[in-house]
Amino acid sequence: MQELTYSDARAELANLHEHALAHLPTRITRRRADPAVLLSEADFRALLSRYVFSPEVFFEPSIVSIWLPELAVWGRGGSFAEARADLLGELDQLLGVLETDERVRLAPNMVERLPWIYRLMGAASDEELEGMLFAEPVVEASAPALVGA
């Protein structure tokens, strides 16, 4: 991986951008700070693509609940649509806190959830976010049984 100092990276930003788009990440170092890595959005998304969400929906007589185990967040409402909206509101609040409060971001229970949090942060639109959370389940085809000769 290419490595540059912060000062050199500033001077070479256009080239670093092209480098990242060519799927070549760059480590950027700075005195008295941890290094950072610049990579393309496509590579960022590919790295996080295996972190899928598995919401669980509970229909009770007067309330619908949606549990998002990857982030330990609930949404509740009188209907599925209300529970979904409540869950999205809870996630919006969580992301707002995480973006502004480093202590919360570095809490042990959040650090283990960072890949899913980064996926949410990387959503380009509300539609993409909802598609990420409420995608149709994928059923993998099972391998054909081996038959002895």
Image (cartoon, helix red, strand yellow):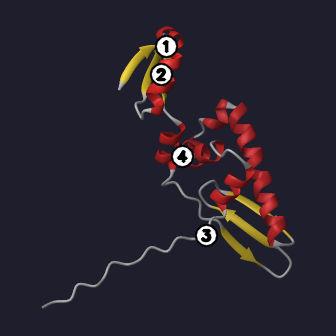
Q: Which residue is mark 1?
A: 12
- Is 9 in front, or is 55? 9
Q: Which residue is mark 4?
A: 115
Q: Amino acid at mark 2?
A: Leu
Q: Residue at x 49, y 74 (%)?
A: 139
Q: Which residue is mark 3?
A: 136
Q: Secondary structure at mark 1?
A: loop
Q: Amino acid at mark 3?
A: Glu
Q: Mark 4 or mark 3, which is nearer to you?
A: 3
Q: Residue at x 39, y 19 (%)?
A: 3
Q: Mark 1 or mark 4, which is nearer to you?
A: 1
Q: Earlier in the sequence, mark 4 or mark 2?
A: 2
- Is 146 in front, or is 11? 11
Circles 4 and 2: CB atoms closer than 8 Å: no
Percent x, y of residue 88 = 76, 55
Q: Amino acid at mark 1?
A: Glu
Circles 2 and 3: CB atoms closer than 8 Å: no
Q: Residue at x 65, y 46 (%)?
A: 123
In which quadrant will I find the N terminus?
top left
Q: Mark 3 or mark 1, which is nearer to you?
A: 1
Percent x, y of residue 34 = 48, 21
Q: CA distance from mark 3 to mark 1?
A: 43 Å
Q: Which residue is mark 2?
A: 16
Callout 1: few (<14), some (14-19), or many (20+) C-alpha neighbours within 10 Å?
Answer: few
Percent x, y of residue 135 = 63, 65
Q: Mark 2 or mark 3, which is nearer to you?
A: 2
Q: Earlier in the sequence, mark 1 or mark 4?
A: 1
Q: In the rendering, which numbered label is found on residue 88?
A: none
Q: CA distance from mark 1 to mark 2?
A: 6 Å
